[in-house]
């Protein structure tokens, strides 16, 4: 199974989700990647450092969603409150799953807010991985 985590710019939320999932997932039959609806600008240093302090590596360049990724995925998880799920409504038509997690983005340079968002994502990933065993 291939999971594609998607947020608006692939700068933070979807990257945290994919990186954390890949870190804790023990089922080698399940793979995760991330992309943004729009390829975003370089990552924010506070977000990178905060994620790293929790053992989550989100360095690298943001990626935009592509036809190749859409063909690759078996499930899309929207890790976003600012991407309309209707954009991926046809995913179900092809027998592929769409899951929506309404995770807010942050433009605030505030470590507490960044930690709260990361914790919200990691809690959902923990439940997802536990359910996949």
Image (tube, rainbow, N blue to C red):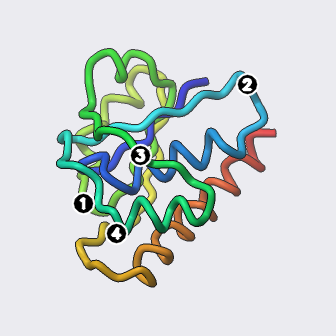
Report the residue marked by disc 3. 59
The quarter of the image holding the C terminus is: top right
Report the residue marked by disc 4. 104
Distance, label 2 to label 4, CA atoms, is 30 Å
Give whichever of discs 4 and 1 has the lower sequence position. 1
Q: Are marks 2 and 4 in contact (CB under 8 Å)?
A: no
Please tell me which residue lies in front, 36 or 114.
114
Query: 10 Å neighbourhood of mark 3: few (<14), some, or many (≥20)?
Result: many
Q: Position of residue 77 (x, y in %)?
A: 45, 44
Please tell me which residue lies in front, 35 or 87.
35
Please tell me which residue lies in front, 93 or 76.
76
* Front label number (2 vs 4): 2
Report the residue marked by disc 1. 82
Give whichever of discs 3 and 2 has the lower sequence position. 2
* Front label number (1 vs 2): 2
The quarter of the image holding the N terminus is: top right
Report the residue marked by disc 2. 28
Q: Is residue 14 left or right of residue 28?
A: left
Give whichever of discs 2 and 4 has the lower sequence position. 2
* Front label number (4 vs 3): 3
């Amino acid at each position: 199974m291939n999971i594609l985590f998607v947020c608006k710019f692939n700068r933070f939320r979807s990257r945290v989700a994919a990186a954390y999932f890949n870190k804790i997932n023990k089922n080698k039959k399940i793979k995760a990647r991330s992309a943004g609806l729009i390829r975003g600008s370089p990552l924010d240093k506070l977000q990178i450092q905060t994620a790293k302090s929790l053992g989550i590596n989100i360095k690298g360049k943001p990626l935009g969603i592509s036809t190749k990724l859409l063909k690759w995925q078996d499930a899309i998880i929207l890790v976003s409150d600012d991407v309309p799920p209707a954009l991926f409504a046809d995913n179900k038509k092809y027998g592929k799953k769409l899951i929506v997690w309404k995770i807010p983005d942050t433009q605030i340079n505030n470590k507490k807010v960044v930690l709260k968002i990361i914790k919200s994502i990691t809690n959902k990933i923990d439940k997802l991985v536990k359910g996949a065993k």
